[in-house]
Amino acid sequence: MAESIAFIDDEFVPVSEAKISIMEPTFTKSDVVYDTLSSRKGYIFRLDDHMRRFEASYRAMQLAPPYATDDIRRITAECIMRSGYGDTCVTLMATRGPFIDLADRDIRKCRNGLMAVCVPYYWVLGKDKQTSGVNMVITENQRVPAGAIDARVKNFNWMDLTRGLLEAYEKGGDSALLCTPDGFLSEGPGFNIWLAKDGRLFTPRGNLLEGVTRRSVFDLAQELGVETSEKPLSPEDLRGADEAFTSTTAGGITPITQVDGKTLGNGAPGILTTRLTDEYWRRRDAGWCGTRPEEVLQDRDVA
Amino acid sequence: MAESIAFIDDEFVPVSEAKISIMEPTFTKSDVVYDTLSSRKGYIFRLDDHMRRFEASYRAMQLAPPYATDDIRRITAECIMRSGYGDTCVTLMATRGPFIDLADRDIRKCRNGLMAVCVPYYWVLGKDKQTSGVNMVITENQRVPAGAIDARVKNFNWMDLTRGLLEAYEKGGDSALLCTPDGFLSEGPGFNIWLAKDGRLFTPRGNLLEGVTRRSVFDLAQELGVETSEKPLSPEDLRGADEAFTSTTAGGITPITQVDGKTLGNGAPGILTTRLTDEYWRRRDAGWCGTRPEEVLQDRDVA
């Protein structure tokens, strides 16, 4: 039977057994970076892109996981194989790890760790929103600026995003889109944002995660002959867009059909959004940019 | 024998057994608020102040711990009593808790929890710094602004503080002092900051934790007839100060004797700093603003 699998303390275990001490700075300082990748029909999507980003994240925080990239690739593949799921999300985490001694709380002396967890593929905005679209609330709560926390270093410091989400729920929204302190659109809890105007695609740039699905949208748009532009975008740009959507590993492309409760465009998922979504999943089903976990594991087992 | 004690999943356990699932948003979104209090010679310091701040923190994040404030007081006291330590730090945590179902990651449906942990009293800047003083680095990495994350809501989203700390270590410092995005002094990883100039005391105001020890310094200064002022302070204000110190639950008052590697004042802990430190510990030893855990427990046991 298929089950969710974690890799923790150098072992593969059922996810229900994957726990960390509440004393670790991994938890008490959220001193951990991560990356989430997905597999579809047995193909891991853009494995090397995720590995590069994960490595950039842990290096930025001076974390040294006890496994080399090749090992982390194999751990990822083995989590998927052991789980028995064909469609998965795998989260990799590089942790600060436990203090050597609670009386000497020097993070430089912590034993850095690596964790992974493989669960069935999930839709961060809900699968039903693929057809209905989401009501996206542009929140007053701002996204952290890069001078404080670098959103490109994928991390669990989500308090701004969670505050945004709670604000969005209060306003009747499905999810939240946060702005930079100077008022430009940034990103939401777990996704990048796109808008379409006059047949062209726009996405914000700045202190936001450089999403792998975001990159895939650039690639798809180019192949479909749609012009793209990465630039500062205002809330008004979104409100005046013809269509809009989110991009994320856990849910692909999701249409935005309302902004702050007001209908966007004609209120249905946009033509370009639908075309990109169909193309994204058609290609994913065919193993686009895919790596089979079996191939990753064929050289040798995880040490 | 004395040992560190945790309260988790409605039970008191040795701290080594206190673990949370790596799937909880408590961890994966750092969706948790906390408070740390201390006991000295068997007296809990300013228990009600900490309880009020803890409650304000969890309410701000719409968290509803499964215990009322009176219960949380008793859990705190019982952790201390069970530990057998006279001098402790106790951390209370209000958690978002686990998702009901991993396929429905709606934080509104999580089962909120309460955790506590009691460890021997520790010095966040190292006890040796009480005499030598710290070399404090004013970092380029900024503190998050209140529009993104409210530092008054005590939380584990420490990535800006940790980045600051890593920067300070690289520059040869003992710890880090972060500035607001507009360049004013804010706070460091686990402490507030004070400076003395011409016999008066100054501390920043803005997006920073309203520390209980910080409040105690205001109280002590008033009783000692020293004028205090809470106002925006620049790095230059600190560099030109006669003396400076940090205030925190885990370490009380600690002198700053260097800023960015340059000697502050005469390079020794300042006269006012020493006077405040002596007075702080003299009063703590005498049970100042203290509550005995036995008193807290005398009404009835924790449910």
Image: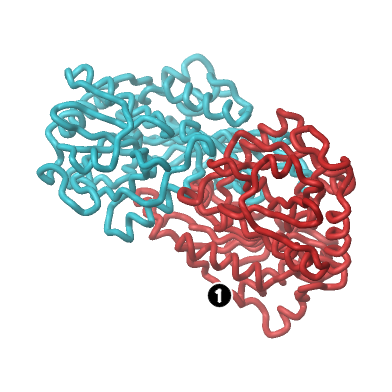
Chain colours: A cyan, B red
Q: Residue at x 50, y 51 (%)?
A: B146
| Residue A215 left/right relative to A82 | left
Q: Which sits in the foreground, A103 or A164?
A: A164
Q: Which sits in the foreground, B260 or B151?
A: B260
**Residue under circle 1?**
B68
Q: Residue at x 46, y 50 (%)?
A: B147
Task: Indicate the quadrant containing the C terminus of chain B: top left, top right, bottom left or bottom right.
Answer: bottom right
Residue projecting furthest to the left: A266
- Could you classify mark 1 by the number of other residues whose Cα lies within 10 Å: few (under 14), some (14-19), or many (20 or more)? few
Is there any visible trace of residue B159 in the rendered image? no
Q: Position of residue A103 (x, y in %)?
A: 79, 48
Q: Residue at x 75, y 80 (%)?
A: B295
Q: Position of residue B193 (x, y in %)?
A: 71, 50
| Residue A134 left/right relative to A5 | left
Number of dots carrying numbers: 1
Q: Position of residue B250 (x, y in %)?
A: 75, 55
| Residue B42 left/right relative to A50 | right
Q: Position of residue B137 (x, y in %)?
A: 71, 36
Residue projecting furthest to the bottom: B299
Residue projecting furthest to the top: A299
Dot 1 amino acid type: Ala
Is there any visible trace of residue B213 in the rendered image? yes
Q: Secondary structure at mark 1?
A: loop
Q: Chain of mark 1?
A: B
Task: Indicate the quadrant containing the N terminus of chain B: top left, top right, bottom left or bottom right.
Answer: bottom right
